Image (cartoon, helix red, strand yellow):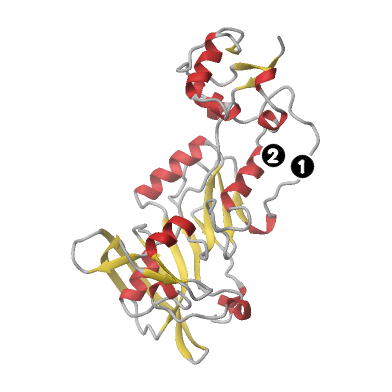
């Protein structure tokens, strides 16, 4: 019987064998995988192994050829990987920083970070995963890159993706402990005349209505189920999660007859829709953010219908994954008119 050999990489160390195998045998359930192991159709270093076996870097995982299709193992670290070069779907123009631990992009407008049923094209996560599989063929059998924090579909700017397990763990820990600072640029309706510190509590809205582009109304639950959409509400009591936002006006302008403010926004907590909801609650909704009371604008005419940009990330000094202390993302064309 012929076997295909796969070599475990650094990011496979201490992973359970059954979890690695599910990446290769994705049509098999866990019970079937354990049966294949008992029959010796899958081996580790030439010997039978249990599904809970912990893999080490350099281990030789052998899978019977008839269990695999070309598409299942192409691009992974096997002795039968296709040798022809493929072009990455990730545009170099949006790469802000990349090393062996983390990839940081300047996210374009109107591209979802995660797969969405309402999206016509690929999500940013799928594009980055395809790039990872092309550029890390000999790194890991089971590791998958993924976003390390959130950005809404229509928010532009800095978004980080893991490139190895160490980078994912460190970045996630620092986000959780608020040691990574995030600064946004936002175009607000109205004149924000002085710096402000907003401390509120935010909770997910249970019911509500939103208007689609076709003019039909849907309940919020329908939006969330079909399009991944939901809103939050802000209050000054202790109901919901605490949110801290600092806002600094940068410049002023007029858009379609409305006074607007370009503001620098620092958040020390990472609540869903934190900036959008707090700005609206305090009387300065984001331009175009109709979900939170902003005035609807023509995206075909102005290029965007929503203006929030993740402009800066600040990292702890001398961090172990080689990030600089500060990264910045160039603003979309529309923002530059307010400088």
Q: CA distance from mark 1 to mark 2?
A: 7 Å
Q: Where does the C terminus fall, quadrant-wise? A: bottom right
How packed mark 1 is, by other alpha carbons closer than 10 Å (few <14, some 14-19, many 20 or more), is few
Residue at point 48% right, 61% down? 152
- Quick one: SS at disc 1? loop
- Most foreground residue, 293 or 226: 226
- Quick one: SS at disc 2? helix
Q: Is residue 71 left or right of residue 154?
A: right
Residue 25 x %, y %: 59, 26
Q: Residue furthest left?
A: 237
The residue that mark 2 highlights is: 134
Residue 213 x %, y %: 53, 73
Q: Earlier in the sequence, mark 1 or mark 2?
A: 1
- Residue 86's tag is 1
Residue at point 38% right, 64% down? 220
State whether residue 311 appears in this view: yes
Residue 308 x %, y %: 48, 69
Residue at point 65% right, 36% down? 136
Q: Quadrant of residue 241?
A: bottom left
How packed mark 2 is, by other alpha carbons closer than 10 Å (few <14, some 14-19, many 20 or more), is some
Residue 98 x %, y %: 60, 48
Q: Quadrant of residue 264?
A: bottom left
Tag 1–tag 2 contact (CB < 8 Å): yes
51 relative to 20, above or below: above
Q: Is residue 35 left or right of residue 130?
A: left
Q: Is residue 338 left or right of residue 130?
A: left
299 relative to 200, above or below: below
- Residue 142's tag is none
Q: Where does the N terminus fall, quadrant-wise? A: top right
Q: Quadrant of residue 225?
A: bottom left
State whether residue 55 appears in this view: no
């Amino acid at each position: 019987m012929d076997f295909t050999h796969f070599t475990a990489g650094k990011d496979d160390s201490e992973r359970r064998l059954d979890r690695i195998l599910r990446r290769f045998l994705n049509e098999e359930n866990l019970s079937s995988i354990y049966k294949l192991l008992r029959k010796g159709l899958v081996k580790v270093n030439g010997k039978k192994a249990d599904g809970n076996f912990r893999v080490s870097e350099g281990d030789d995982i052998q899978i019977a050829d008839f269990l695999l299709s070309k598409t299942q193992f192409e691009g992974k670290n096997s002795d039968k990987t296709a040798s022809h070069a493929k072009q990455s779907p990730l545009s170099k123009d949006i790469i802000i920083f990349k090393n062996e631990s983390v990839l940081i992009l300047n996210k374009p407008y109107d591209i979802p970070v995660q797969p969405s049923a309402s999206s016509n094209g690929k999500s940013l996560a799928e594009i980055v995963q395809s790039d990872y599989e092309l550029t890390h063929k000999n790194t890991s059998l089971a590791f998958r890159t993924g976003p390390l924090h959130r950005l809404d579909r229509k928010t532009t700017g800095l978004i980080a993706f893991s490139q190895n397990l160490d980078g994912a763990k460190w970045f996630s820990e620092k986000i959780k402990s608020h040691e990574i600072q995030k600064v946004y640029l936002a175009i607000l309706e109205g004149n924000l005349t002085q710096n402000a510190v907003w401390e509120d509590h935010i909770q997910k809205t249970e019911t509500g209505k939103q208007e689609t582009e076709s003019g039909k109304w849907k309940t919020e639950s329908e939006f969330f189920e079909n399009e991944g959409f939901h809103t939050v509400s802000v209050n000054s009591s202790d109901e919901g999660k605490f949110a801290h936002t600092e806002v600094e006006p940068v410049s002023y302008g007029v858009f379609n007859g409305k006074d607007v403010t370009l503001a620098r926004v620092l958040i020390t907590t990472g609540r869903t829709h934190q900036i959008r909801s707090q700005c609206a609650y305090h009387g300065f909704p984001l331009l175009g953010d109709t979900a939170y009371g902003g005035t609807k604008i023509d995206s075909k005419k102005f290029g965007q219908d929503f203006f929030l940009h993740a402009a800066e990330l600040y990292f702890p000094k001398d961090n172990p994954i080689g990030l600089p202390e500060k990264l910045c993302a160039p603003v979309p064309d529309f923002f530059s008119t307010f400088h």
